[in-house]
Image (cartoon, grey):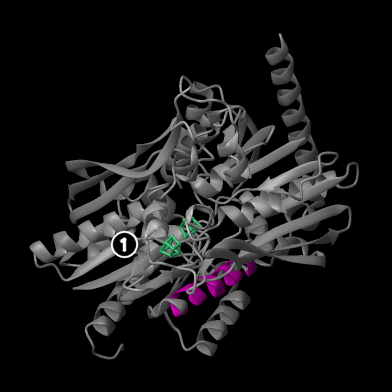
């Protein structure tokens, strides 16, 4: 079972839900927590896992052998991202723009291009208690998050429950992280910003045909429009977490909610049971 | 013309509320919403759309089934695993065109992709350039670049002093696109352990691209010890902390009403933001901050 935790907008409590759900489940199940928010990974702050392994993420970028190159410009013509240019009798490459597609090296008529690894991030893994932990980190100054996310997701094993912390937004990194999930939990808050971004997130998961439900965080502030939206669109509200100074303080100190307030554990277990039920139901109706 | 981009690392730190407040405070400016994935600024500024333009960007491969011999070369070469059973999975296609170039029967064409829209609108506070990226689209960085470019153009045409932009979350492609070449990055952070981690990374990006940064600690009173540490973190990197804004429910109330906080309340949050703007506008005009 793979559950992703997303939100259109950052800072709604995605990290809180991902870490607490993983910790709550870890007594009874094998759980993996994969932090795919590689631009700003934060789950480790709350888990403080012991890191036991590390891998650098590279993408293959072109390296031109000047002796073989005839400056025919083929490489520059085929590159869709302007990552390689021929200026007079020099070929310039721009690794930050390169997607590592391999078109230039494959299509160079002189076989003048080989590929070298360009580091764009790292993936680390380890353990905290019963939680197997993986996260990725985009190198500062690099632009391309999806390859790092793909590397994190390669470590999903299909035996355990996998919880995937998704980056904020609705574009390519989000899609990359959610793809392959059985269910997506959308975390939001009851404000007009929360509603606007929730509606975008719902569209995104629907595009990917992943079923979703909502966790409403900081309930008590704002207005009732998020709840109205959910009931109008038949999106289940799976859990409500109130605006509470104590919860905010724990969060600010980097303490997971179920670690600081163990009474919350049963709520997260119920959340998991609800998600399981929804997934089973959906699979059953899909088979019919 | 000065270009100020407001960033926050993770998002959800109050960035958009602060941009909304600056919209009401700054005299001569154009606003730009560079958070093209999940734009929220319009909820405070209530723009009326004046111009809408399609954003065409990137390409997607399409296989003509009548021409395809099912040789499988495209599938083998595609590094994004976007071709399965001689069909293109559009969400995975990065539009590199390798398949198009190698297909021996020329069955693959590259089709332009309409990835969203951008708008120029009018608001009570001046012009706003904003955009809407289509769901699950790529190239948000390019759309951010278009929004900035258009905002600058408006500023030049109307001889405005500032471009104030609401930046995207994270540190990746859209952030780099919103930041490079700006006059100042205003980083809005929260005194949480995770906020401090995020701040470090955004400061790193600012340094990497040579953009001067200044920090605003929002909700500083939810953890004063962390606020102190954030201030130390900043002073170690020779970055100014221009404001410490207290937590106040009035901020959320103002969002619910759809007005900038400075027009909703004259409490401590508003006073602190007013002082912050004086400092920033003073500093960016060359005189030293008070
Ligand atoms: S395609 Fe090959 S030979 Fe032609 S310019 Fe590029 S590197 Fe040189
Ligand atoms: S690998 Fe692809 S993206 Fe990179 S330079 Fe070559 S053609 Fe361009």
Q: Quick one: B262 or A26, which is closer to the camera?
A: A26
Residue B236: quadrant of the picture: bottom right
As for residue B206 lying within the magenta part, the answer is yes
**Main secondary structure of the magenta stretch:** helix
Q: Is residue B247 magenta?
A: no
Q: Which residues are magenta?
A: B193-207
What residue lies at 38% left-to-right and 80% top-to-bottom? B212
**Residue at position x 54%, y 33% from top?**
B89
Q: Residue at x 34, y 43 (%)?
A: B132
Quadrant in which residue A200 is drawn: top left
Nearest to the observer: residue B245 or residue A200: A200
Q: Position of residue B214 (x, y in %)?
A: 41, 78
The residue singled out by tag 1 in the image is: B165
**Disc 1: host chain:** B
Q: Position of residue B188 (x, y in %)?
A: 45, 68
Q: Is residue B118 left or right of residue B141?
A: left
Residue at 59 percent across and 61 percent down: it is: A60
Residue labelled 1 has its Cβ within 8 Å of some atom of ligand 2? no
Quadrant where the N terminus of chain B lies?
Answer: bottom left
**Residue A19 in view:** no
Q: Is residue A101 shown above or below B276?
A: above
Q: Dividing the picture into quarters, in which one does residue B113 lie?
A: top left
**Measured along the vertical axis of the image, is residue B190 above or below residue B286?**
above
């Amino acid at each position: 079972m793979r559950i992703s935790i997303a939100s259109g907008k950052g800072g709604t409590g995605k990290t809180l839900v991902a870490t607490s759900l993983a910790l709550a489940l870890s007594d009874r199940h094998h759980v993996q927590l994969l932090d795919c928010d590689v631009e700003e990974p934060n789950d480790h702050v709350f888990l403080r896992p012991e890191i036991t392994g590390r891998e650098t993420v590279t993408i293959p970028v072109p390296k031109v052998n000047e002796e073989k190159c005839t400056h025919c410009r083929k490489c520059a013509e085929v590159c869709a991202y302007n990552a390689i240019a021929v200026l007079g009798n020099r070929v310039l490459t721009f690794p930050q723009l390169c997607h590592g597609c391999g078109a230039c090296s494959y299509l160079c008529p002189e076989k003048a291009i080989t590929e070298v690894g360009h580091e764009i991030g790292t993936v680390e893994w380890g353990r905290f208690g019963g939680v197997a932990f993986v996260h990725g980190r985009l190198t500062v100054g690099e632009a391309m998050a999806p390859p790092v996310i793909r590397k994190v997701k390669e470590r999903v094993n299909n035996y355990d429950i996998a919880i995937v912390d998704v980056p904020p937004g609705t574009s390519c990194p989000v899609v990359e992280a959610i793809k392959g999930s059985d269910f997506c939990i959308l975390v939001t808050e009851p404000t007009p910003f929360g509603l606007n971004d929730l509606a975008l997130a719902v569209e995104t998961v629907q595009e990917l045909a992943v079923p979703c439900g909502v966790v409403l965080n900081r309930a008590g502030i704002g207005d009732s429009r998020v709840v109205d939206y959910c009931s109008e669109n038949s999106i289940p509200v799976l859990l409500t977490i109130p605006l509470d100074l104590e919860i905010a303080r724990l969060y600010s100190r980097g303490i997971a909610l179920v670690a600081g307030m163990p009474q919350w554990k049963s709520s997260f277990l119920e959340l998991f049971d609800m998600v399981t039920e929804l997934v089973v139901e959906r699979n059953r109706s899909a088979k019919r | 013309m000065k270009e100020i981009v407001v960033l926050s690392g993770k998002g959800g730190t109050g960035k958009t509320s602060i941009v909304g407040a600056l919209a009401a405070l700054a005299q001569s400016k154009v606003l730009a919403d560079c958070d093209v994935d999940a734009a929220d600024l319009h909820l405070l500024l209530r723009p009326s759309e004046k111009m809408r333009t399609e954003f065409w960007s990137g390409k997607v491969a399409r296989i003509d089934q009548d021409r395809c011999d099912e040789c499988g070369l495209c599938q083998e070469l595609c590094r994004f695993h976007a071709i399965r059973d001689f069909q293109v999975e559009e969400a995975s296609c990065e539009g590199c065109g390798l398949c198009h170039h190698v297909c021996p029967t020329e069955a693959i064409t590259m089709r332009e992709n309409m990835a969203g829209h951008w708008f120029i609108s009018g608001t009570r506070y001046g012009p706003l350039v904003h955009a809407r990226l289509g769901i699950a689209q790529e190239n948000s960085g390019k759309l951010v670049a278009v929004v900035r470019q258009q905002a600058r153009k408006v500023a030049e045409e109307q001889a405005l002093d500032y471009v104030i932009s609401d930046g995207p979350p994270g540190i990746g492609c859209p952030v780099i696109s919103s930041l490079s070449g700006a006059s100042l990055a205003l980083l809005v952070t929260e005194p949480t352990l995770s906020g401090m981690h995020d701040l470090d990374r955004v400061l790193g990006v600012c340094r990497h691209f040579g953009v001067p940064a200044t920090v605003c600690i929002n909700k500083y009173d939810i953890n004063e010890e962390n606020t102190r540490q954030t201030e130390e973190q900043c002073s170690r990197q020779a970055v100014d902390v221009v404001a410490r804004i207290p937590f106040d429910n009035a901020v959320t109330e103002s969002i619910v009403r759809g007005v900038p906080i400075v027009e909703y309340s004259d409490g401590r949050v508003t006073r602190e933001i007013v002082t912050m703007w004086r400092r920033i506008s003073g500093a960016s005009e060359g005189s030293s901050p008070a």
